[in-house]
Amino acid sequence: MKIVSVVGTRPNFMKEYSLFKAFKDNDIEEVIVHTGQHYDFEMSLLFFQELDIPNPNYIADVIKGDHGKQTGAMLALVEEVLQEEKPDLTIVCGDVNSTVAGALASAKLRIPVAHIEAGLRSVSYYNPEEINRRVADTCSEILFPHIQEAYDSLLGEGYSPENVHLCGDVMKDTLLSIQRDFKIRAERGNYHLLTLHRAENTDDAERLQSIVSALNESEASFVFPVHPRTRACLKHFGLLKELEDNPRIELLPPLGYLDFIKYLAGADKVLTDSGGVRREAYILKKPVILLIDIVWVRSMVEKGYALIVDADKEKILDAIVNFRPPAERPNLFGRGDAAVKIADILVNRYVNR
């Protein structure tokens, strides 16, 4: 069996770590296509080196521009690869532009698509990731939701139960493996970890100012790996220098996966607008302060382990001091064996049929 895996961003690379091992153990031939979506090409290759994943078989130049330009270029790339490789199946993960480009290219060539992390929904219908997920789900022959609510969403939307498989979160597989292999312990440290990259925050001067003001007014210490686009926006709005001058805020360049997980494991709380980082923080038992009112994995909020503060300065300041999740933390993301289950299902469906 031959699979083409389409990757392009940090969350894709992390999932590829566990999927690659599971596919190899099942004698599945995998062709990896890097679409060039990642904001820093050298940084993206660092993920492969750190995680001991083979370099992609196909690597595109970094594609800059609006969603349409980027997605169209990636669609053309994946189509060309699929015509050359003629795989039995195309794997896409998550909700980035690479995901929807891979799914569209494959479906139009009548090559089955498997969507890992399918079915995740929010109420923000015009959010770019929401659109990507829904389109990728529609193009997919087999769907692998990572949480119960995503599974329920797919069945509620009319997808056939025989094509929907709840296996757990491949991101958890990778995180637990990295913790074990590199002996990274999760402890509550003396700093909070901040990530901020979503356009809703970085491109809005008022929202960005509010978040920066909260950081500066807080008496806590922060570690802040700064996304290149976030840094450019901070500079554009005249906010970068005040962060640089604050001795309690450590600004870092973008981190490789291992370094990021070490900082995450040692943080007291996590402030983020990322869909993936909030899940990693939850898995490592970190209180999660959400800097955007877009909720994926509603259960995290309902169970009291994630708190929505949006870009409200006063709410951010209060959460930094007072947010304390309950002691009970339900297992939302599976047992850490999702990739193995996915590989078994694919072999049974496409090889042993």
Image (spheres, helix red, strand yellow):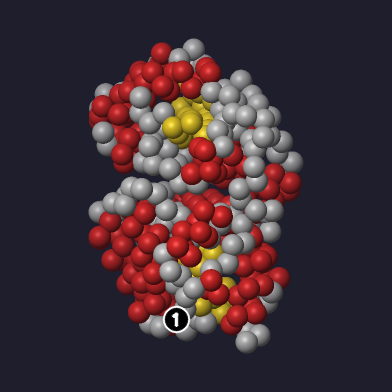
User: Where residue 121 appears, x then y in whole percent?
Assistant: 42, 53
Name the foreground residue: 315 vs 178: 315
Identify the residue shown where x is 60% and y is 80%. Answer: 349
User: Quick check: 120 left or right of 284?
Assistant: left
Q: Quadrant of residue 25?
A: bottom right
In the image, residue 31 sits, relative to residue 146, either above or below, namely below
User: Where residue 272 appears, x then y in whole percent?
Assistant: 46, 35
User: Where residue 112 appears, x then y in whole percent?
Assistant: 47, 78
Name the foreground residue: 23 vs 200: 200
Q: Quadrant of residue 136?
A: bottom left
Q: Could you tell me if residue 252 is visible in this image?
A: no
Element marked by disc 1: loop
Label 1: which residue?
Answer: 111
Identify the residue shown where x is 27% and y is 37%. Answer: 203
In the image, residue 171 sits, relative to residue 24, either above or below, namely above
Pick the quarter of the image with the C terminus.
bottom right
Q: Quadrant of residue 217?
A: top left
In the image, residue 52 sits, relative to residue 40, either above or below, namely below
User: Where residue 144 appears, x then y in whole percent?
Assistant: 54, 64
User: Quick check: 175 left or right of 101?
Assistant: right
Q: Could you tell me if residue 101 is visible in this image?
A: yes
User: Quick check: 111 left or right of 189?
Assistant: left
